[in-house]
Image (cartoon, helix red, strand yellow):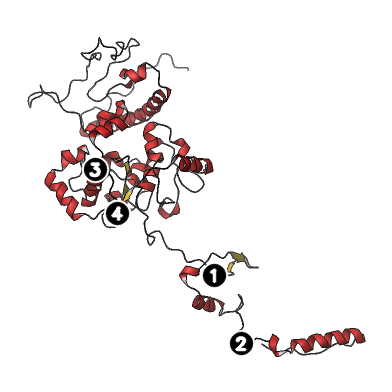
């Protein structure tokens, strides 16, 4: 440390004596630290070198930055050493449901982010928006992961029911190995960084499509779906076998030989074995209006042969009631009427006795909300069919367009 020049200005004797005493104390060797013992200053060029040599990653803490006079940010302490999301160890998928206390505490603590509808301020889906019985299966899953892996840190709103279920599923799903992602996730043109498939109540969701594809509305073409792609990765098959051994897609697209090979070749996705779900259990968990969708594709009637069409003509008469029309559970002939429809593709929930009797408020509201999602999906399917038919030349461009005739009611 450089020595100070001791020049005491001429002043009163008392002030002169006080200054001399201070300088004498300053010369005390006990107060002067050796250069090697002196603690480095943050402004010392060797400061960070001293810190790095005396501290480890385990002891690192977050130290704020300060703004210098010229506006630049200057580190005033040890900067935290954060790992990238790719380097972090994945906690794994959900293995249990939340307790009532856990669920209530989380819902109470969540605050909606006004910039991203459907998300809270931490970027997680708002649990209070999961209203229907089906959505609550996703809501109740207890995630080990504490944050969503938004691609490049960019959040997306979760306005629709499908988006919020996919976001919650991404938080709780089974993660793909880095080299076995679906095609869309491998290209990186999706919302989240990782590729994960989702099981709610031991039921594989979206025909095995990943949550990433589902969030952006591309679940219908995810390369994990066995009904679309023949070479589904073995880890996906093994995950379905472990959690949902009664999956209709397993029985339809993979025989016993394929599933046994998947068990042996793929590593276990979790260390804890989850109990399988029997068809009877699935029947009890699923509302009556949804059970048929779990059974796979609709089977053709027995009278169909190669010489007859596989589906009926579009001119479909009114729906016929079942043979048990005289029983108390039969709908009252749908007295309110309504347009006819093809029962091959659609079964009206209004024929459900539990619904048309209107005694279960929750069940009725769940069905009402589900119908809104069905309308969106059917509208989308109709638009896709129209585009495909026109592309193939099966539907003329002017088939359903407005005519060019003069509108006699038009205002001049």
Residue at x-position 30% and y-position 51%: 272
Of marks 3 and 4, which one's residue comes earlier in the chain? 3
User: Which residue position is annotated with label 2?
Assistant: 35
Per the image, label 4 sits on a secondary structure element best described as loop
Which of the 4 image quarters holds residue 204? top left
As drawn, the residue found furthest toward the right would be 12
User: Which residue position is annotated with label 4?
Assistant: 271
Of marks 4 and 1, which one's residue comes earlier in the chain? 1
Q: Residues within 10 Å of mark 2 (few under 14, many from 20)?
A: few
Distance Cα–Cα, label 3 vs label 4: 25 Å
Distance Cα–Cα, label 1 vs label 2: 22 Å
Distance Cα–Cα, label 2 vs label 3: 69 Å
**Quadrant of the snapshot with the N terminus:** bottom right
Residue at x-position 22% and y-position 15%: 322
Of marks 2 and 4, which one's residue comes earlier in the chain? 2
Per the image, label 1 sits on a secondary structure element best described as loop
Distance Cα–Cα, label 4 vs label 1: 38 Å
In percent of width and height, residue 255 lies at 13, 43
User: Which residue position is annotated with label 1?
Assistant: 78
Residue at x-position 38% and y-position 50%: 192
Q: Nearer the viewer, mark 4 or mark 1?
A: 4
Distance Cα–Cα, label 2 vs label 4: 56 Å
Q: Is residue 70 above or below residue 28?
A: above
Of marks 2 and 3, which one's residue comes earlier in the chain? 2
User: Which residue position is annotated with label 3?
Assistant: 225
């Amino acid at each position: 440390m450089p020595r100070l020049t001791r020049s005491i200005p001429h002043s009163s004797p008392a002030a002169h004596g006080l200054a001399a005493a201070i300088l004498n104390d300053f010369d005390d060797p006990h107060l002067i630290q050796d250069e090697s013992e002196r603690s480095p200053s943050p402004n010392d060029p060797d400061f960070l070198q001293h810190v790095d040599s005396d501290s480890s990653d385990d002891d690192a803490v977050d130290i704020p930055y300060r703004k210098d006079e010229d506006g630049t940010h200057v580190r005033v302490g040890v900067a935290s050493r954060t790992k990238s999301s790719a380097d972090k160890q994945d906690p794994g998928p959900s293995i249990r449901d939340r307790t009532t206390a856990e669920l209530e505490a989380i819902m109470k603590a969540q605050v909606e982010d006004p910039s991203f509808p459907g998300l809270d301020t931490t970027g997680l889906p708002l649990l209070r928006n999961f209203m229907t019985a089906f959505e609550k299966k996703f809501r109740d899953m207890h995630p080990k992961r504490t944050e969503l892996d938004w691609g490049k840190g960019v959040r997306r709103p979760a306005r629709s029911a499908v988006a919020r279920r996919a976001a919650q599923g991404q938080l709780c799903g089974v993660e793909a190995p880095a080299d076995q992602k679906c095609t869309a996730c491998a290209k990186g043109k999706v919302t989240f960084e990782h590729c994960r498939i989702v099981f709610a109540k031991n039921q594989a969701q979206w025909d095995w499509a990943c949550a990433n594809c589902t969030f952006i509305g591309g679940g219908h073409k995810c390369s994990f779906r066995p009904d679309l792609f023949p070479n589904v990765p073995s880890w996906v098959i093994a995950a379905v076998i472990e959690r949902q051994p009664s999956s209709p897609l397993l029985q339809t697209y993979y025989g016993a030989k394929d599933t046994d090979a998947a068990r042996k070749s793929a590593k276990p996705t979790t260390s804890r074995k989850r109990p399988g779900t029997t068809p009877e259990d699935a029947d009890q968990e699923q509302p009556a209006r949804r059970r048929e969708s779990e059974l796979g594709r609709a089977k053709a009637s027995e009278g169909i042969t190669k010489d007859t069409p596989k589906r009926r003509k579009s001119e479909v008469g009114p729906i016929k009631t079942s043979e048990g029309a005289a029983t108390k559970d039969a709908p009252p002939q749908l007295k309110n009427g309504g347009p006819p429809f093809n029962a091959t593709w659609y079964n009206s929930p209004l024929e459900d006795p539990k619904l048309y009797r209107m005694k279960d408020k929750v069940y009725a509201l769940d069905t009402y909300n589900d119908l809104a999602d069905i309308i969106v999906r059917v509208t989308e399917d109709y638009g896709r069919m129209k585009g495909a038919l026109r592309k193939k030349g099966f539907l003329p461009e002017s088939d359903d367009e407005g005519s060019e005739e003069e509108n006699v009611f038009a205002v001049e």
